[in-house]
Amino acid sequence: MTQTTKTQVGIIGGGPSGLLLSQLLHLQGIETVVLERQSRKYVLARVRAGVLEHGFANLMREARCSERMEKEGEIHHGFYIYDQQAGKQRVDLHKYSGDNSVIVYGQTELTRDLYEAREKMGGIVIHNAEDVKPHDLTSVSPFLTYRKGEDVHRIDCDFIIGADGFHGVSRKSIPKDILKEYEKLYPFGWLGVLSRTKPVSPELIYARTERGFALCSMRSQVLSRYYIQVPLSDTEEGWSDDAFWDELKQRIPADDAARLITGPSIEKSIAPLRSFVAEPMRYGNLFLAGDAAHIVPPTGARGLNSAASDIYYLYSALVEHYKKGSSKGLENYSARALARVWKAQRFSWWMTMLLHRFPEMPGYDRRLQDIELAYLFSSDAAMSALAENYTGLPF
Ligand code: FAD
Ligand code: PHB
């Protein structure tokens, strides 16, 4: 038998995008239900973003979820770019972005904060929801169905939000003749390792070498996150911890390699690099947000930060709808969101093309890559463009 309930906004996906929107709307008296395919434990075991822009942090504040982020998050005023030939140069974000900075605070932690806030307010987040399906999207009364064990449930909604990531069901529910997809795949992935060790550098190091790209990042002063570029054919199992540390040492500056503290990996995974945008981000009463609509390679640390502007635009539009009876924000959502999404795409593509070693790259392209970096290191204007994008363009 199907059990039917009702809510105002049905949200597919209990990742950061879905949870943040649910929390913000609840604070405005707008009812939501979040359907998440996985368990809470599974979602919290995914190690992903580490760098947040202040726009995202401000939304966490507005959602009253920022207490731990303010205490434990680290403000970073700059990072390093290292090139084997050109050496190591600091990108002074503060100077070049007009006093802006970024916050180092893990996605795992902020997702935990959002879950706790939802729980405290009695928000409805349904985990292990199987076979979630959106229906009647172009009607005024769309609905969701899902299965939990033997029981089938139906939720009637005013609006459905697809915040279910790249592999979710929402985007796939938009007819193929309406949805246009743009995609660029890169011929490598990032092998990431999390280890309970002191980070090698107080600020992030992005390294470009003949052996490939590497990134030294962190989650706290006792938790390091490192990445190396690997071929797509590699597997986590094929990389022992020792092999990972040896390779990392060869890709970072010698003085950093000498002081690198290694330890057992507590998480190790390979993420493929992809650029992707789906247009439009609205179909009837379904609205896509975050990774469900767009993906960037992690090089520019833009993924979650791009989701933040979607959430902000959707939140404002839904509040405008319910409080002022105006549907203008909802009408404009897709165009407004995509305008910022494409800027993050451009920046992430640029940083990825600049710093990675491409297999079989023609000599001409390699020389252009060299000169792009030399220009960056020598030009205040180029540094400002980098800093402005890395710290986040305005919403
Ligand atoms: P997701 O986090 O993918 O959440 C979607 C949720 O929907 C998931 O919990 C999933 O289980 C659920 N779901 C999927 N299908 C269904 C279904 N059918 N039914 C119900 N639920 C479903 N971004 C940054 O801004 N800064 C960084 O430093 C950064 N670093 C990164 C490093 C790596 C290695 C990676 C891989 C990504 C990084 N990102 C970074 C990107 C960032 O992690 C993503 O952009 C972010 O997770 C997007 O959040 P989301 O909520 O939109 O999607
Ligand atoms: C991370 O810490 O996971 C991280 C930081 C910066 C990036 C990508 C990932 O550009």
Image (cartoon, helix red, strand yellow):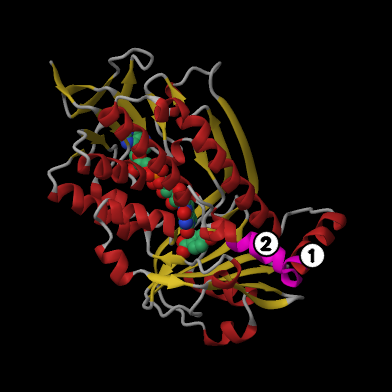
**Residue at which label 2 appears:** 355
Report crowding for label 2: few under 14, some 14 to 19, many 20 or more residues within 10 A (C-alpha).
many
Q: Amino acid at mark 2?
A: Leu
**x 55%, y 47%: residue:** 296
Q: Earlier in the sequence, mark 2 or mark 1?
A: 2
User: In the rendered structure, which segment of residues is drawn in magenta?
Assistant: 375-387
**Residue 169 appears in the figure:** no
Q: Is residue 132 left or right of residue 381?
A: left
Q: Is residue 104 left or right of residue 28?
A: right
User: Ligand 2 closer than 8 Å to the CB at disc 2?
Assistant: no
Image quarter of residue 130? top left
Image quarter of residue 89? bottom right
How many discs appear?
2
Asked whether the residues under the numbered discs 2 and 1 touch, taking CB atoms below 8 Å apart as contact, a structural biologist would say no
Q: 318 or 174, which lies in front?
A: 318
Among all residues in the image, which is located at the extreme right? Answer: 364
Image quarter of residue 361? bottom right
* Image position, residue 98 (x, y; %): 55, 66
Q: Is residue 225 above or below residue 12?
A: below
* Image position, residue 378 (x, y; %): 76, 72
User: Ligand 2 closer than 8 Å to the CB at disc 1?
Assistant: no
Q: Is residue 81 left or right of residue 176?
A: right
**Residue at which label 1 appears:** 370
Q: Please check the rendered image and state whether residue 382 is part of the magenta-colored stretch, yes or no.
A: yes
Q: Is residue 222 above or below residue 357?
A: below
**Residue 75 appears in the figure:** yes
Q: 246 or 64, which lies in front?
A: 64
Q: Considering the numbered disc 1 on the image, is that residue within a helix, a strand or a loop?
A: helix
* Image position, residue 222 (x, y; %): 36, 77
**x 84%, y 53%: residue:** 362
Q: Amino acid at mark 1?
A: Asp
